[in-house]
Amino acid sequence: MNAIATRPLVLDPDGAADPCARCGVRASSVCDAIPTSDLARLSAAAVTGHAAPGSSFIDEGEPATAFFNITGGTAKLYKLLPDGRRQIVGFVGVGHFLGLAVSDTYAFTAEAMEPVKYCRFSRASLRRLLDDFPAMEKKLLAVASNELVAAQEQMLLLGRKTARERVASFLMAQARLGVACMAPRSHFTLPMTRGDIADYLGLTIETISRTLTKLRTEGLIEIPGATDIVVKNRLAMERIADASE
Amino acid sequence: MNAIATRPLVLDPDGAADPCARCGVRASSVCDAIPTSDLARLSAAAVTGHAAPGSSFIDEGEPATAFFNITGGTAKLYKLLPDGRRQIVGFVGVGHFLGLAVSDTYAFTAEAMEPVKYCRFSRASLRRLLDDFPAMEKKLLAVASNELVAAQEQMLLLGRKTARERVASFLMAQARLGVACMAPRSHFTLPMTRGDIADYLGLTIETISRTLTKLRTEGLIEIPGATDIVVKNRLAMERIADASE
DNA sequence: TGCGTGCCTTGATCTGAATCAAAGACCCGG
DNA sequence: CCGGGTCTTTGATTCAGATCAAGGCACGCA
């Protein structure tokens, strides 16, 4: 189960998945879960599509008719309140699955940040796929379980951490993206705006900016350009992030 | 998939599951997913146990060796920060699955609120179970997907809703518990303390108390006893809960 | 080259919820 | 029936982060 669980999976009948723009990892091909001999069936079930930056390809509240697998680009997932308040519930890249839930309507909007490519499956073809390939189902269960753990971690952040702790947590999570089993990177690029970070961390743009500035003046990070982060003191940052100081 | 997804499932070789104390629903027996003829195999894999109120049966950070299915009672799930700040990530009752994630350690602590009974499966026996009974796996996937949706809803609440909106959301969710497809109850009992509610909603005890009092003086609810809630104006409460006013 | 439009930063002020503090209310065991 | 917890409510005060406001910078485009 572990091998299945730890590598991204792309359901791309063309077999042309990009390495993930978020983390640089190249997703394992569909063949990990489905024998090559059955690829034709997968191709028949899938419809490929794409979305330009700023445009959404899943809309909160719309009838949930399909299941998506990201094969290129990055997107943000968010929920809106009627007055416009926004909560970003995740940033996703290559290999991510969307629209799995058993509900009538989509629970969030998915909007491309960098040009997104995806494979779309109807509910019916997804069900057939899962019936035919139990390994697929195992993979999805593992993915969903891990996302649940991440969601609970985010609840802790949103419910109980200070602005400083939230920003530090976010930066350290970004540093770890896509470097499983290796040391986190000390230099990386944020592919999202301050506004997106704010809506992900439950704060405002101004608080994000001020907090980053503070961390910079304390010598814990450097910010060569608005989207570039260099972590100067990882240990201190980690300690702030998990409130152990 | 829907029938499997919508009713609680209890993996109890003794077949003696209680109706859920949280919501009154009697869980479907294990037989929905596993043929009676194979019950012996399930019994062999499962170990039953129980936990008294206030005691935990899963501890955050401990090696994740087992998988749990609640067969009686209710529990709260929470994560702690080193300085004692606490975030409750969920309240669970009969039929709930715990410890599914593919990680080395448990992501949260599970503590009984009312005497809890459970079935425990080792990782290995869970894997065998899932291999043998694909319907089990389908069920777990459906459950995990729905929990993910709920977690995202909670992120919106924690990240963007006001105290008033959080409390109203919480009360309306409690009113809906276990009455799928029926009108929410207008009278119900809260099985948790103000402290638990506070840690679930990312607020303090005092704010919970004040907010409840405010809703009461406005005539939207009544509070006959600290744990009893009567909703007097459901429409207004719903509107506050989803910020559409 | 100049101008508009998004971002981002910084400063001043405000405010919703936290914190600090003190009484009730309730429950259980003896 | 009493005593000592725990839980809840209410009030006074504080404060972290939001809001309001003003520039600054980078980039695309005419």
Image: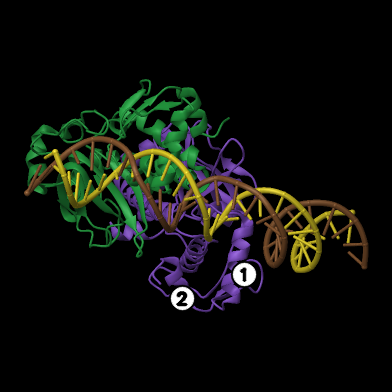
Chain colours: A green, B purple, C yellow, D brown
Give me the C-alpha separation between circle 1 and circle 2: 16 Å
Occupied quadrant, residue D24: top left
Occupied quadrant, residue B110: top right
**Badge count:** 2
- How would you rate the neighbour count of disc 2 (Cα within 10 Å): few for under 14, some for 14-19, many for 20 or more? some
The residue that label 1 is drawn on is B213
> Does the rendering let one see residue A180?
no
> Does the rendering let one see residue B244?
yes
Assign the C terminus of chain B to one quadrant of the image.
bottom left
Residue type, numbered disc 1: Thr
The residue that label 2 is drawn on is B236
Query: Image height check: is A180 above or below A195?
Result: above
Front residue (pair A167, B28): A167
At mark 2, the secondary structure is helix
Q: Residue at x 20, y 48 (%)?
A: A68
Query: Image height check: is B7 above or below B233?
Result: above
Label 2: chain letter: B
Q: Residue at x 36, y 64 (%)?
A: A83
